[in-house]
Amino acid sequence: MRQAIGFIIILLCFPFIWILYSFIHTEILVASSYKENLAESIELSSPTISSPIVFLDEQGEVFSEDYIEWRDPIPLETIPLFVQELFIQSEDVEFYHHIGFNFSAIFRAVFANAIANSKDQGASTITQQLVRLRYLTTEKTYERKITELLYAYELEKQSTKDEILTNYLNEIYFGNQVYGIGAAATYYFSRPLHELTDAELAFISAIPNNPTLYDPLVNFDATKKRQELLIDVLVKNEKIAATNGDALKAEPIILHTKTKTQLYPAYSTYVLEELKNLIANTEGFAEKIATAQNEQQKQHFEKKLQARVNEISTQGVSIYTALDPIKQRKDEKYVNDLLSKTAGLQAATAVINNETREIISLYGGTNYKKFDFHRAFQAVRQPGSAFKPLLVYAPLFETTSVTPQNTVNAGKFCIGTYCPQNYGGAIYGNVTIQQAFRFSHNTPAVRLLQTTGIETAFDKLAPFQFSHIVKEDYSYAAALGGLTKGVTPLEMADAYTGFINGMYKPAHAIRKVVDKDGEILYTWNEEKQEVWSPKTVQTMRHLLRDVVANGTGKGISVQSSYIGAKTGTTNDYVDYWIAGLSDTYTSAVWIGYDMPKNMKAIESKKIHHSIFNQIMKNDKRSY
């Protein structure tokens, strides 16, 4: 009877046994899958971190840095053994012996927390701390702690102890947006890690335990006490002698905190824009954007380009530029001081070295701050008569046999409904082309554009970098600088370099972009091309010089064997321009208000002439 009852009970248990087996089998599969996923998700390869981007001037001196986080990753062999011992002895004395976590330390922490009814007591190894830095949060829960143990164990299986320690020392937080022991040395003492004394090494090693409490800029004394505690740990563990420890604690600590270099923001802001263009041209983004079949496709390529720029900008690149810091500083001060006398008045300038065709100085606006609206390359304004040499006169001499001594009618003139007027509504008879150029008469310019032909004239502008000219601009109004959108001061200066010798190459600020190892990533490789014949160049230089000597350029005074320029004024006096060149520089100046405003009242002050005189100076002894 008992056997029968037992048999019946066994039969009744089979469903429960099957359910239990199914549950266990499922959990095993899940665990196996989790283990595989865990192995795939844990890799020691360095995470994407933001390294500083450094800007260097023409002499290779740093003038600006861009970073949100200050980092300077270094290999373990360059990290002093003293530092390594400081962290191992204070954070994880069994580091080279455990499997990612320390059982005895965990049990001690659990016991202490149980007695205190809290979760404050930690037992994290260096491996666990690295896992937490990379993959997890700092939430104090037992669930997070278990996940941390699993991650730490897997990390230990995939890597060596030295690899873990290297990454740990390069990624721990030292307060004030400083990450890594190498960066901490340069930030708090302005010296590389290997130049610090042992006392200084111990001092910065005190910070990561609690970067807020041990912030030396706020709580210096607390940081010093923590430093002395670390030194005592080394003495206790017989890593250094007691007398040595006392000497280290007695050594004075003097901070030399790094100041973020941010000189010449008008120049560095433009350099970042040019970096984007350089990457776009080098890696094919520019062509893809230009030939996009629709707006959606264009935006897609633009987003990919920006992502690439962001990627490069966080890799710790150094950008070598053509900046002349002495000139930049002097020009900025002069223009700021001059504009301060007229409320709200703005200006923009660009200066290009004739020999190298490099941008050496930029002015983006009064008291410019980084990433402000940059009027030298972002302010698109009507160029007025300063556009005439490029669209009217140079194409005329290039494509016809006309000379400056030929005459042209300066009287009233209409083409269809378009009836331009000379300055002040003046009416003249026949004048020479040189006179028309000298005094910037308008009706002759339109007549001469008609002679050349609109299409032919605009074809001559094609090599230049005018990025805002559209098909709607192909009209006679363009002869007087009447454009749909306009041009920028930098575009004008760039185009005027064609009058140096007829050869043209786009002006750039960037010489090269290199990575942390000094390898060149990007550089401009453009060749010069002939845009104007020698005859046209000779004629245009003669006319530009005549403007300065006898025409609207009176007031321009530059110490140079050659100086030529063209002025420009737009309707209602809302823009004043000068573009021109000397033996050394080619430049453009614009002044006006951000919200267009009539400037007739200040015309006689010739503020743009004064600015042009300043930025064209080449005597560095005056700086």
Image (cartoon, rainbow, N blue to C red):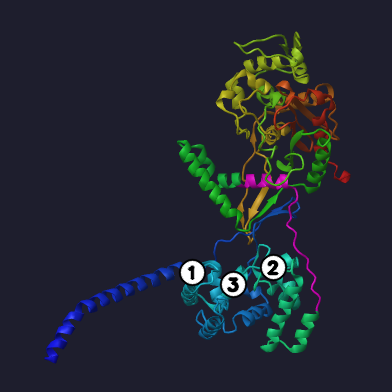
Q: Is residue 215 depicted above or below 272 in this figure?
A: below
Q: Residue at x 82, y 30 (%)?
A: 607
Q: Position of residue 302 (x, y in %)?
A: 52, 43
Residue labelled with disc 2 = 184
Q: Residue at x 53, y 86 (%)?
A: 104
Q: Position of residue 252 (x, y in %)?
A: 81, 75
Q: Which residues are magenta?
A: 251-275
Q: Position of residue 263 (x, y in %)?
A: 75, 51
Q: Give the alpha-carbon distance from disc 2 to disc 3, as whole Å.
A: 14 Å
Q: Earlier in the sequence, mark 2 or mark 3?
A: 3
Q: Residue at x 62, y 15 (%)?
A: 450
Q: Earlier in the sequence, mark 1 or mark 3?
A: 1
Secondary structure of the residue carrying numbered label 1: loop
Secondary structure of the residue carrying numbered label 3: helix
CB of mark 2 within 8 Å of CB of mark 3? no
Label ID, residue 168: 3
Secondary structure of the residue carrying numbered label 2: helix
Q: Give the alpha-carbon distance from disc 1 to disc 3, as whole Å.
A: 14 Å
Quadrant of the rendered structure where residue 225 is? bottom right
Label ID, residue 306: none
Quadrant location, the N terminus? bottom left
